[in-house]
Image: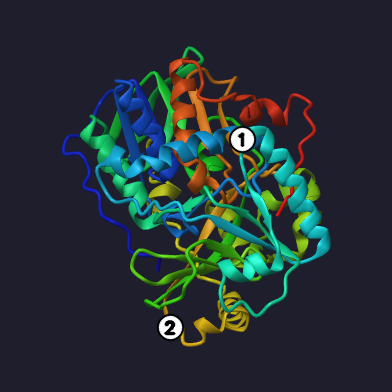
């Protein structure tokens, strides 16, 4: 069962028309809706379950520039400016605090890679630094493991995933958003080559534009429009502890384990070194596109063939307007956490930081990350279907970048000057001959 998320009450009246319909109540969909209504655009946000019930409440809560793909740096800079004022913007507690992020360098080779990233990031006014062993020990007291140093960005921060998206959704409703939860989209209809209606389980909504921000569901939603996107899912496991005193203010990744201090006095604990990839029919379909990234990340990925292959082969089909859809049968993706990963994270954390010897696990959960072959998102119109837009494939680092991603999506929908250059995130990059590659800095 996933973490407890702040509740958001749906709008009372079901709409029959809007300028824009946003599909997906995760942080990217909510950020898009918030940006649109602040521009005075009539907007409806549809969520088959509840706001932030899937990956948007299950992630680490890191808001980071550190180690990002260079192509994302203008967008994360814009996003961090929005995070800085998010509590004021929403009038609510999102948990955002600027406390810095540290990535340890576990080898000299990795340290050199971190130094190269620092040099690149300076072109974008990002002032990260390389910590020495002693400086790392000062910032992470009690650290027993020996590292070659660490990549540190003091201006980075953290927020509370279970609070931030609901706060943004409520702020958007204050500004005029119509939010419908427990309202699955069955199909996106077209007329004369452009979107014209969204058919939901509760009725049809006429519109001029549709934004698909469905996270792990985006591929299937787009498939229903005859649009293919090479998207797969990665399972990430997370736990939270009961309150525990430790004099560590920054978010810290030690490779095998990563920690973030929570507002409730506990810690969110995760690992980038152990993720599960369930083999599905899409895994075979997109094997060629994902192979370069897999070769680089294979040590941190555990391939698993099991029930999910059969489930997706038999049941994961695009919706039809007059039939109950998969989106209604699975309101919330709630995968079981990887128990072996949980146990290893606790062992590794206690070994590296003895202050956590007496940690008590309060809860654990898992989430499905929507990922693309180059590990950067699509935030773009879909050229083959006028009025159709997509924001997906954030590849495990969408939480921090979401506020600006939503603003960029809103700008594109409205035909306004975009907040940053949108070219790196265009949908057509998978078909226009661009060399698709992921950048690996961490």
Q: Is residue 423 above or below residue 172?
A: above
Q: Nearer the viewer, mark 1 or mark 2?
A: 1
Q: Given contact means CB atoms under 8 Å apart, are the residues at marks 1 and 2 in contact?
A: no
Q: Of 92 and 413, which appears nearest the observer?
A: 92
433 sits to left or right of 395 = right
Total numbered circles:
2
The residue that label 2 is drawn on is 360
The residue that label 1 is drawn on is 125
The quarter of the rendered structure image containing the C terminus is: bottom right
How is the structure coloured here? rainbow
Is residue 401 in view? yes
Name which residue lies at 42% across and 48% down.
327
Q: Residue furthest left?
A: 12
Q: Is residue 186 above or below residue 210?
A: below
In percent of width and height, residue 204 lies at 31, 29
Q: Is residue 91 above or below residue 430?
A: below
Q: Of 141 and 177, which appears nearest the observer?
A: 141
Q: Residues within 10 Å of mark 2 (few under 14, many from 20)?
A: some
In percent of width and height, residue 311 lies at 56, 59
Q: Is residue 357 above or below residue 57?
A: below
SS at mark 1? loop
Q: Of 421 and 265, which appears nearest the observer?
A: 265
Is residue 330 in view? no
In percent of width and height, residue 308 lies at 59, 62
SS at mark 2? loop
The answer to which quarter of the image holds residue 41 is top left
63 sits to left or right of 172 = right
Work out how far the residue at label 1 is from the one at label 2, CA to CA, in angstroms: 40 Å
Name which residue lies at 77% across and 46% down.
116
Residue 134's tag is: none
């Amino acid at each position: 069962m996933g973490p407890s998320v702040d509740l958001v009450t749906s709008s009372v009246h079901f709409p029959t028309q809007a300028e824009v319909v946003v599909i997906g109540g995760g942080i990217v969909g909510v950020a898009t809706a918030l940006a649109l209504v602040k521009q005075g655009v009539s907007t409806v946000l549809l969520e088959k379950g509840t706001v932030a019930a899937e990956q948007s409440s299950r992630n680490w809560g890191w808001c980071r520039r550190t180690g990002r793909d260079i192509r994302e740096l203008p967008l994360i800079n814009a996003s961090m400016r929005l995070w800085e004022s998010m509590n004021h913007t929403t009038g609510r507690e999102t948990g955002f605090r600027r406390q810095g992020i540290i990535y340890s360098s576990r080898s000299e080779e990795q340290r050199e890679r971190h130094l190269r990233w620092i040099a690149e990031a300076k072109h974008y006014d990002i002032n990260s630094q390389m910590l020495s062993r002693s400086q790392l020990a000062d910032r992470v007291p009690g650290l027993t493991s020996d590292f070659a140093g660490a990549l540190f960005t003091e201006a980075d921060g953290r927020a509370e995933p279970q609070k931030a998206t609901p706060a943004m959704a409520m702020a958007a409703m204050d500004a005029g958003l119509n939010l419908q939860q427990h309202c699955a989209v069955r199909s996106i209809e077209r007329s004369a080559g452009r979107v014209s209606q969204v058919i939901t389980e509760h009725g049809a909504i006429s519109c001029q534009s549709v934004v698909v921000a469905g996270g792990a569901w985006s591929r299937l939603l787009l498939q229903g429009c005859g649009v293919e996107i090479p998207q797969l899912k990665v399972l990430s496991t997370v736990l939270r502890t009961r309150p525990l005193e430790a004099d560590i203010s920054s978010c810290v990744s030690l490779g095998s384990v990563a920690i973030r201090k929570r507002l409730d006095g506990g810690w969110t604990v995760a690992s980038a070194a152990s993720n599960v990839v369930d083999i599905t029919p899409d895994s075979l379909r997109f094997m060629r596109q994902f192979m370069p990234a897999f070769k680089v990340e294979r040590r941190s990925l555990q391939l698993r063939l099991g029930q999910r292959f059969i489930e997706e082969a038999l049941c994961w089909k695009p919706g039809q307007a007059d039939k109950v859809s998969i989106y209604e049968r699975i309101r919330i993706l709630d995968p079981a956490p990887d128990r072996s990963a949980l146990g290893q994270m606790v062992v590794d954390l206690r070994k590296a930081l003895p202050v956590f010897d007496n940690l008590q696990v309060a809860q654990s959960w898992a989430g499905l990350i929507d990922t693309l072959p180059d590990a950067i998102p699509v935030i773009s119109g879909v050229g083959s279907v006028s009025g159709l837009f997509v924001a997906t494939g954030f590849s495990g680092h969408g939480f921090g970048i979401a506020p600006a991603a939503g603003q960029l999506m809103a700008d594109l929908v409205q035909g306004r000057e975009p907040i940053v250059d949108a070219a790196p995130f265009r949908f057509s990059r998978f078909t226009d001959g661009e060399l698709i590659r992921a950048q690996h800095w961490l």
